[in-house]
Amino acid sequence: MKSSGIDAYRSQASFKVEDLRNTIFGEEYARYRKEALEVFLSDPLFLSGERQLSQAEGRERTHQRWKRLVEMDFFNHADLIKSDAIDDALNIWDFAVTPRELNHLRVFGGAIESSGTERHAELLRKTKNHEIVGAFCLTELSHGSNTSKIQTTATFDKGEFVFHTPNIGATKCWAGNLGFSATHAIVYAQLYVGGNCYGIHAFVLQIRIGIVLAGSRACLFAATVAIRYSVERKQFGPSDSEEIAVIEYPLQRHRLFPYLAAGVVLRVFQRIFSNHFSEYKRRIAVGEKSTDLVEFSREIHALSSCTKPVSTFIGMEALGEARRACGGHGFLRSSNLNSVYSNYDPSQTFEGENNLLMQQTSNIILAKVAGRNSETRNASPMNLFNFLAERPKRFEKYSSCIVHDVLSAYEYLIHYLIQVTIAERHKLKTEGKDPFTILNETQV
């Protein structure tokens, strides 16, 4: 039975829901997403019971759901729009399955595809056909972002490699799929041959016999659950005989609507960024080698390094605020907010710790400013750094376009922070500080 409360609010809309959905997601994307959700609704394996599963049972169910999707050929396609749409629908249903496929196909498979040779063609084929399950083992207990210092060793001895974990700090961790289902793993280790160290190398190891927008999704999921709850939940009113929906309270809207807006904005950004990234990969695939492509790569790196932290920080805030906005009901298992919150929390750390990733973006921006007079200083294939070429104007009055005003404010803020940082670094340099200390003392 449909909710009368929700129906009443939907009837007040000045637009068609289908039109809004197609505008945000794209018509093709929305169709794939809807088809995937219909599959999940019709398959008993994707229906959750009331009993709380143990960790082992939960992992087994995730593995079985992943296998079912493989059998249905859900992941075996090169269509980026379809892939993202299915991931989106899957995250709504079971947030644990998507990271499993992400680690296997995009991280493990992507590493083989980008770093492997003809010798790895058969391994790549098995990866894409899901004949094996891959894991990615780089981070250690004592080292993560500083990859050059990882301690695991691979010593070439009498025609074979001997892997060694010299101490507990060298223990591999944060290796998705490794604990339960992976059959193969890419392991990064220091290569030793004849007593000499040749630095970090990647090795593919068989570890068992056979058997990846998140911020937008979190925001939209959290806002959807909490707003729908707020429509149904009635509490107090102007008179004893009348109760009003919680969503009518300005404070409730103030708490939830920004995350709904953030989800839409992140979704639109993701579509635009995906187009740029697809173009970048196409140019690499055809063998292009140009200065423009190098700058394109730098922009992709700078943008992805800051948007991952921003989107995951916002996603976690949205899930937390949605849970609180639903009161005690937000902690019910049926809301799914607790489960998604717990599964989403590691996104702030895996694939790069958020605070360290943002440093990469700031370093690229400062390097662009330092190269003010170089040929590449003004090169910006995505127009990402064009605003650095001009001094921002001080605010005088609001224009007719709020987007323009917001962009101008952020451009002014970035210019200000750049100048403050440059001045502080110059001061530390004149005091005789070394580059490592200067970098650390100007991060905040």
Image (cartoon, rainbow, N blue to C red):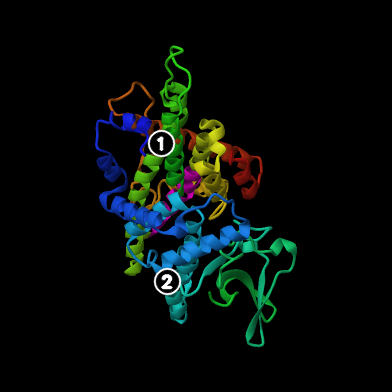
Which quadrant of the view contains residue 4? top left
**Camera-side residue of 130 and 213:** 130
Magenta residue span: 294-312
Residue 43 in the image: above or below residue 418: below
Query: Looking at the picture, how far across and down is residue 284, in whole percent?
Result: 36, 65
Q: Residues within 10 Å of mark 1 (few under 14, many from 20)?
A: many
Which type of secondary structure does the marked residue at label 2 adopt? helix
Q: Is residue 309 magenta?
A: yes
Query: Looking at the picture, how far across and down is residue 152, in whole percent?
Result: 67, 68
**Camera-side residue of 171 and 71:** 71
Q: Which mark is residue 260?
A: 1
Which quadrant of the view contains residue 6? top left
Horizontally, residue 69 falls left or right of residue 330, namely left
Residue 187 in the image: above or below residue 364: below
Q: Assign the magenta stretch its main secondary structure.
A: helix
Q: Which residue is mark 2?
A: 128
Counting residues from the N terminus, which is met first, the one under dot 1 or under dot 2?
Answer: 2
Horizontally, residue 299 falls left or right of residue 57, namely left
Horizontally, residue 396 falls left or right of residue 180, namely left
Give the Cα distance between marks 1 and 2: 35 Å
Residue type at tag 2:
Lys
**Camera-side residue of 56 and 138:** 56
